[in-house]
Image: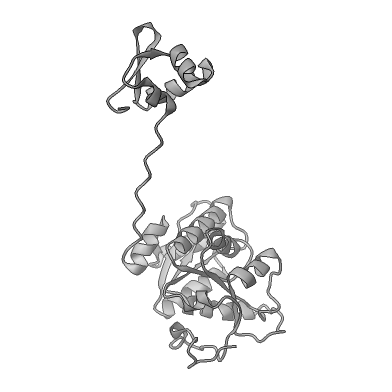
């Protein structure tokens, strides 16, 4: 248990309305000490698109050193947590029950207790109650620099989290969805009301933190064996196959691909040679 004023108490909770009087923790404390935290929330009944986007954003933000915050509900929340865990990043779940009674229970709750962090203002032994979840939403947003809503119906708990975030002065962002799907109505409503539209994790990082991490330059592609074997000569596919110890059909497939990539060119008489690009 940690309390306000303690060294490990999150400073971001000091000025929200109705701050918790204590928090119970289960797991690694590092996610709570992170300098950058972003909440990803959404519907419990996502489309495949929504679930894929939550995984994508969760993984990309975690790789950028951002702690992913959510509520461990089925659907978007769990996908965001899984994305962060998949890349070995930090993630924490704010519960509507005691940390010893996580809901929903299951493998993800156990994994978060071991590799991430479970957080609750409700003491151990407290079972989940419907009114606990709207309350915990203020802590989800309060712990975060921003809240991203991936998919939400017109009446959704995720919109409550977004409203808490707006009241707390946090960034509110939303991912656009299909105009004819009910799980887009909540996010599109947020966009009409002024939420920031984002289409990529890089946009989110730039909007919230002013910059996104620089991607490492791509490693050069390994030189094709056929291109290397040509050595500036003109050779037939049979010659190349013999030189490489491979089947002619296999070499021909590779040569056609290299021709499409502009690295080799076919010459009269069934001969092949490198182009300037293949040098």
- Image quadrant occupied by the C terminus: top left
Q: Identify the residue at horizontal 35%, vertical 68% (top origin).
A: 209
| 86 w.r.t. 112: above or below | above
* Badge count: 0
Quarter holding residue 199: bottom left
Q: Is residue 83 above or below residue 17?
A: above
Q: Residue at the left extreme?
A: 276
Q: Residue at x 37, y 59 (%)?
A: 203
Q: Residue at x 32, y 63 (%)?
A: 211
Q: Is residue 160 left or right of residue 112?
A: left
Residue 236, given in percent of the width and then of the height, sits at 41, 12
Q: Is residue 69 above or below residue 46?
A: below
Q: Give residue 86's position: percent from left, percent from top.
A: 56, 58
Q: Which colour scheme is used?
A: one colour
Horizontal relation, residue 265 to residue 149: left or right: left
- Quarter holding the N terminus is bottom right
User: Farthest residue in the bottom direction?
Assistant: 5
In this picture, residue 155 sits left or right of residue 273? right
Question: Residue 189 in the image: x percent, y percent?
Answer: 46, 64
Q: Where is residue 188 in the image (x, y as percent from the top left)?
A: 46, 60
Q: Foreground: 32 or 158?
A: 32
């Amino acid at each position: 248990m940690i309390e306000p004023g303690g060294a490990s108490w999150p400073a971001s909770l000091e000025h929200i309305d109705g701050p918790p009087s204590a928090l119970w923790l289960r797991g690694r404390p590092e996610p709570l000490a992170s300098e950058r935290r972003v909440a990803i929330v959404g519907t419990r009944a996502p489309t495949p698109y929504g679930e894929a986007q939550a995984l994508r954003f969760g993984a990309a933000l975690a790789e950028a050193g951002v702690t992913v915050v959510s509520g461990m509900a089925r659907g978007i929340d769990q996908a965001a947590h899984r994305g962060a865990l998949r890349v070995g990043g930090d993630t924490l779940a704010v519960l509507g029950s005691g940390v010893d009674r996580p809901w929903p229970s299951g493998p993800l709750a156990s994994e978060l207790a071991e590799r991430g962090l479970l957080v609750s203002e409700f003491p151990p032994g407290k079972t989940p109650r419907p009114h606990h979840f709207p309350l915990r939403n203020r802590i989800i947003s309060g712990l975060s620099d921003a809240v991203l809503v991936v998919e939400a119906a017109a009446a959704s708990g995720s919109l409550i989290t977004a409203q808490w975030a707006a009241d707390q002065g946090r960034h509110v962002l939303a991912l656009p969805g299909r105009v004819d799907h009910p799980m887009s109505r909540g996010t599109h409503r947020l966009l009409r009301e002024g939420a920031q539209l984002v289409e990529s994790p890089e946009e989110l990082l730039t909007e919230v933190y002013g910059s996104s991490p620089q991607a490492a330059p791509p490693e050069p592609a390994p030189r094709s064996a056929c291109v290397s074997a040509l050595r500036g000569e003109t050779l037939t596919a049979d010659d190349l196959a013999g030189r490489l110890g491979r089947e002619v059909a296999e070499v021909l497939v590779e040569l056609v691909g290299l021709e499409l990539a502009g690295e080799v060119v076919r010459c009269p008489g069934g001969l092949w040679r490198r182009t300037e690009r293949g040098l």
